[in-house]
Image: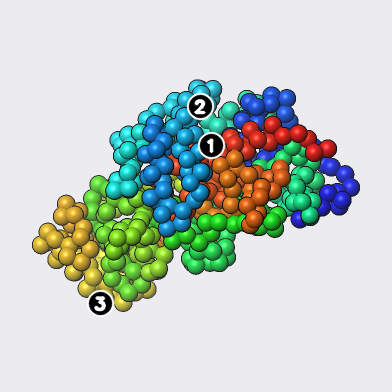
Amino acid sequence: MASLASIKSWDFETDVLILGFGLAGACAAIEALATDPSAQVLICEKMPERYAGGNTRASGQSLLINKDPEALKDYQRRMNQSNPVPEEMLDAWAQQMSRLEPWIQERAAEAGARYIHGTGFTDREAVLEFPEMGASEAVAHTATILPIPAGVWLAFKTNIDRRPVRVLYETPVIDLIQDPDSLEVFGAMVEHQGKRSAIKARRGVVVATGGYEADAQMQRDYCGYEPLYPLGTPGNTGDGLRMLQKAGAELWHLRNRGQSGGIWPGLKLEGRQTVYLRQLFWQSFSWIEIAADHQRFYNETAELQLTHYKEKVRGHWVDTPHIHVQPVHMIFDETTRTMNCLATKAFTWNIAAEGLDWSDDNAAEIANGTILKADSIAELAKRMGRDPAAVMATVDEYNKACAQGQDARHGRHPITLQPIAQPPYYAIRIVPAVVCTSGGARRNIESEVLTPAGAAIPRLYEAGELGSMFSDLYQNGSYLTEAIISGRAAGRNIARAKSWD
């Protein structure tokens, strides 16, 4: 850490310093000014303005709306069973969740945006991920703010643009400025316009810098996963986690039973770190996936998006095997190629931030070599670098299951058993793609960062994905609403604090 005695002069001064400009950071700024309209608020964002928004911008924009806090608390407790969080935190969170919808509606109205029930890109009004744990009682409905993609982020950014909030883009945080004995936080060191700058935060600091999805070494160290590619921002490289650890925080949720947001099938373009999400809604089903041993390894057409790509194995919900059986290829025929765009266009960083398209008939991706093409399965196997006999045997076995109307090996629904029979044939690499990480500093419901002894570090707060309370399973729409609640708590508490100087 940088000590207060080491600071010879301040380059910037503010009352409330927010590190990270996603939904949590935006909500911290909004709530700080609602609490004290005279407070000075400064946001430092690592990315350029055109890439601000963090994972909020790339997400599916789902907002969980609850009207029964007891049911929500029971549901989340069951989802956290393998790694429980404090009961008092669950209780306060559920109470706040039940009162949250009007505030979100106000933010949408202020931005001139349309708030709706549903996801905005499907017909479902509510996504119920784990019904056996109480989803239908806990979830009143799913909501979002249009447009799709990125409507929630766009609405909250408009709210910030309308307020006296200063935002420094391309300004990553380097370190906190602290008392080495009491751990009290006085500000932060950042890199701004090519030089180190000291920012005085008279009332406190909010760390809302997101997770570590885009840092391959942290994924190896904390999750044991490799390779793994982000569906969200490439800016989430664990900066806040390292800084909070150095600041004396206790860490939690770094190695859960699995990734809370799941490991999804991704499509990677050459030279790009972030990936597309493979299509969720199919018009035809003449396709399979094969693992490193050239065999199918799960029910490919199960609606796993409804459980964030968790499958139930011997009574336990675990990540689907994609991460453990690489390399994985999807094999499909001309029927599936012409009837389906392989990429989901409703969200992900490539779509929402980069503006990268995927051709509706996949022709552009065939032309650039992302999708392999051949006139026979044997030739396709050679192009994949696989054993032709083994791949042909797997396809033949699948096609026989289609003829019989029964998938004895993996239990695909009979309506999805459509043979891979219309040449030419195609293949594409399926890479394991991660939504987000929930590890970070342990915090309480007031967003105060806690030491291993359970004491709050003075003037230090954490919000959003970094240090999330979700420790195992995850209900659709919870991350964004938790970002709102934790961001608001941080902003409100800092705005109420007295200046340290």
Residue 122's x, y, as percent? 33, 38
* Residue topped by disc 3: 389
Q: Secondary structure at mark 1?
A: helix
CA separation, marks 3 and 1? Answer: 53 Å
CA separation, marks 2 and 1? Answer: 10 Å
Left or right, 138 with respect to 9, comes to left
Q: How many marks?
A: 3
Type of residue at label 3? Ala
Q: Identify the residue shown where x is 23% and y is 50%.
A: 284
Q: Identify the residue shown where x is 25% and y is 77%.
A: 389
Left or right, 70 with respect to 339, comes to right
User: Which of the two marks, 3 or 2, is nearer to us in this view?
Assistant: 2
Within-10-Å neighbours for mark 3: few <14, some 14–19, many 20+: few
User: What's the mark number on residue 103?
Assistant: 2
The earlier-in-sequence mark between 3 and 1 is 3
Q: Identify the residue shown where x is 80% and y is 47%.
A: 197
Residue 165's x, y, as percent? 68, 31
* Residue topped by disc 1: 484
**Does residue 157 appear in the picture of this structure?**
yes
Q: Identify the residue shown where x is 26% and y is 65%.
A: 375
The earlier-in-sequence mark between 3 and 2 is 2
User: What's the mark number on residue 257?
Assistant: none
Left or right, 402 with respect to 93, comes to left
Asked whether disc 2 touches disc 1, contact meaning CB atoms under 8 Å apart, the reply is yes
Type of residue at label 1? Ile
Asked whether disc 3 touches disc 2, contact meaning CB atoms under 8 Å apart, the reply is no
Within-10-Å neighbours for mark 1: few <14, some 14–19, many 20+: many
User: Which of the two marks, 3 or 1, is nearer to us in this view?
Assistant: 1
